[in-house]
Image: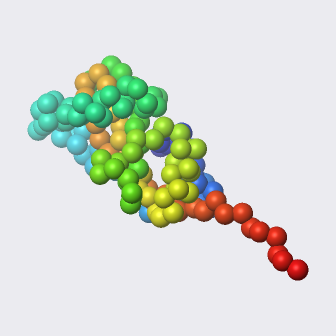
Amino acid sequence: MPWDPPAFRGAPTAGVAAGGGLPGEIDYRLARQSLISEYRKGRLARHEVCDAQPELLRAARNVGEESSRTCPICEEANVVLVSYVFGPRMPAHGRCITTRTELQKLSRSAGVDLACYVVEVCPGCRWNHLARTFLVPATTNRRRSAPSA
């Protein structure tokens, strides 16, 4: 069953058609499934797949959006989705965003395309995996001025 990133159901900004996938979108479900399969076969230890950094765990606990998916490793908690945006004039570590509105404001203020990364995190066992990435096209907030006579 496919799932959407936090607060970005459908298109992230105006002008992008919902339902047909986003331009520049990369989905990492196959890589995720391969990693889980290797873990379940005993080829990877739990500490190798449950290695979320403290800052990612903090973001998951405080601003992430809980999904309906159970953690594939501990199977005790639902994973949380955390989104980061990267682009010019952004911090090197990106900016954690929590709403579609915040994403739209960033795309307007930056004036350039941004890259959004959605990570799934289990706050319980520290599982984390990049779920998908997509481009956020630059938008402008210019109003048309009335033609002069």
Residue name at image x 30 percent, y 29 percent: 57
Q: Residue furthest right?
A: 149
Q: Which quarter of the image is occupied by the C terminus?
A: bottom right
Viewer-proximal residue among 55 and 19: 55
Q: Is residue 65 visible?
A: yes
Which residue ends up furthest to the front in the rendered image?
149
Residue at the (53%, 56%) spot, across then down: 109
Q: Is residue 45 above or below residue 19?
A: above
For the point 35% across and 41% down, the residue is 119
Residue 14's image quarter?
Answer: bottom right
Residue 13 horizontal side relative to residue 98, left or right: right
Colouring used for the render: rainbow
Q: Is residue 29 above or below residue 112?
A: above
| Residue 42 occupies quadrant | top left
Q: Locate residue 122, reporting x and y percent.
A: 32, 28
Q: Residue at x 43, y 30 (%)?
A: 63
Q: Position of residue 88 (x, y in %)?
A: 38, 60
Work out which residue is located at the far bottom of the displayed protein and give it. Answer: 149
Q: Is residue 52 left or right of residue 105?
A: left
Q: Return the x and y of residue 18 as percentages of the image width and height.
A: 60, 54
Q: Quadrant of residue 81?
A: top left
On screen, 36 above or below 89? above
The number of numbered discs placed on residues in the rendered structure image is 0
Q: Is residue 79 visible?
A: no
